[in-house]
Amino acid sequence: MPDERIRDTSVPPRERLRECIWRLLEPFGAPAEARELWTNLLRMFAEAEADTNTRAGYAVLMAEAERRVGAWLAILEEEGALPRGDNARRTDLLLTIVDGLSIARAMPLSEMHLENEVATLSLAVDAVFDVDFPLRPIP
């Protein structure tokens, strides 16, 4: 998944982050594709019978998503566009929103689901920029 756009300072930082986060939703496609993908994900990774290697595979996928989003946030911090803060908590917020939007895409309640997704994602990105996520002290 290309993420060079996060470094394009000719584009406002919030827009760059929104675009990168939006790309995480692309594999879920249209509602039918999202349903199929979530059904397969749950069948493969969440079943009680899933072996430790399968669960470890899921952990790798999630760690990569966290690493990638965290890297985007670090880039924005480094350029001074995003206030310093707890990027692990910011990442958790953004990925939780992505998960929720992908599930909602699988079972849309209205024809305006894409517009609603854009609005929700925009609110989450605004929260990352506007809400204080203070660094937690290291225990």
Image (tube, grey):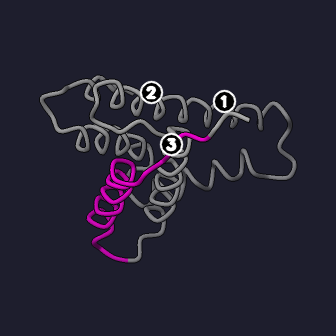
In-image side of 75 versus 57 (left or right): left
30 in relation to 112, above or below: above
- The residue labelled by disc 3 is 91
| Residue displayed at 29% across by 58% down | 118
- The residue labelled by disc 1 is 60
Mark 1 vs 2, N-terminal side: 1
- The residue labelled by disc 2 is 71
Mark 1 vs mark 3, CA separation in Å: 16 Å
Proximity of marks 2 and 3: CB atoms separated by less than 8 Å: no
Proximity of marks 1 and 2: CB atoms separated by less than 8 Å: no
| Residue displayed at 43% across by 51% down | 132
x, y (%) of residue 127?
Answer: 38, 55
- Amino acid identity at mark 3: Thr
| Residue displayed at 63% across by 49% down | 40
In depth, the one of 122 and 81 nearer the eye is 81
Q: Does the magenta stretch include residue 50?
A: no
